[in-house]
Image: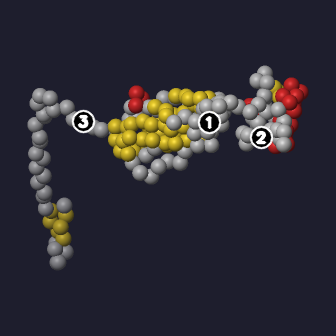
Amino acid sequence: MTLTDEYGATGTDEAIVTINEKPAPTGGGAVYIPTLSISETSISTSAIGEDTATISWSTSLFSTSRVIYSDEEESHSYKSDTPNYGYAHSTKETSTKVTGHKVILTDLYPGTIYYFRCVSKDSKEVVSAEYSFTTLGGKILGDINRDKKVDIFDFNLLIVNWGDSPKNRKADLTKDGKVDILDFNTLMVNWTKI
Ligand SMILES: [Ca+2]
């Protein structure tokens, strides 16, 4: 370090730094660094109804909770670079951090398979493996927009998705890969009677 006095003369000052080395730990001194993880065996579903299901899991550290999910006709291929990891829906992330997590899914459709993953975050976000459950009850055939009626709105969706490889796979009522006259007939047969 260079020092300058009030007359402009300069000199140097040496600092001596002593480093005290700690001896290496001996015998059984493994250092545990906690990291966030989801216990896959803790993941369970309960209270499954026609339009609701409860998902529970536990984590190694206090963290937030949310569930990402897709129904059987929506894409659920894992994509690490998207906010919902390739799933169609996500519950709102909780602001409270817990180790025992519980998330209630609502507005589900009857008689439908749902694929889901649990997501928790502290400083980093972790995602579980994929699991599935099936809601109770039965689907209403022809109800493409899932409002429990078969009406003009479903007809519109049928027309918009007409042809091979429909964008909305729910419009393919006969599940043969295309939307055509057979789907139209199915829609008509199931038209909601008022
Ligand atoms: Ca409908």
Q: Which residue is mark 1?
A: 50
Q: Quadrant of residue 91?
A: top right
Amino acid bearing label 3: Tyr
Left or right: residue 125 compared with residue 8:
right
The residue located at (58%, 43%) in the rendering is 106
Residue 67 placement (x, y as % from top left): 52, 40
Q: Is residue 122 visible?
A: no
Numbered circles on residues, count: 3
Left or right: residue 150 compared with residue 135:
right
Q: Residue 124 — which label?
A: none
Q: Are marks 3 and 2 in contact (CB under 8 Å)?
A: no
Q: Which residue is mark 2?
A: 149
- Graded by Cα atoms within 10 Å as few (under 14), some (14 to 19) or many (20 or more), the crowding at tag 1 reads some
**Circle 1 sits in a helix, a strand or a loop, which is it?**
loop
Q: Is residue 139 visible?
A: yes
Residue 30 placement (x, y as % from top left): 19, 32
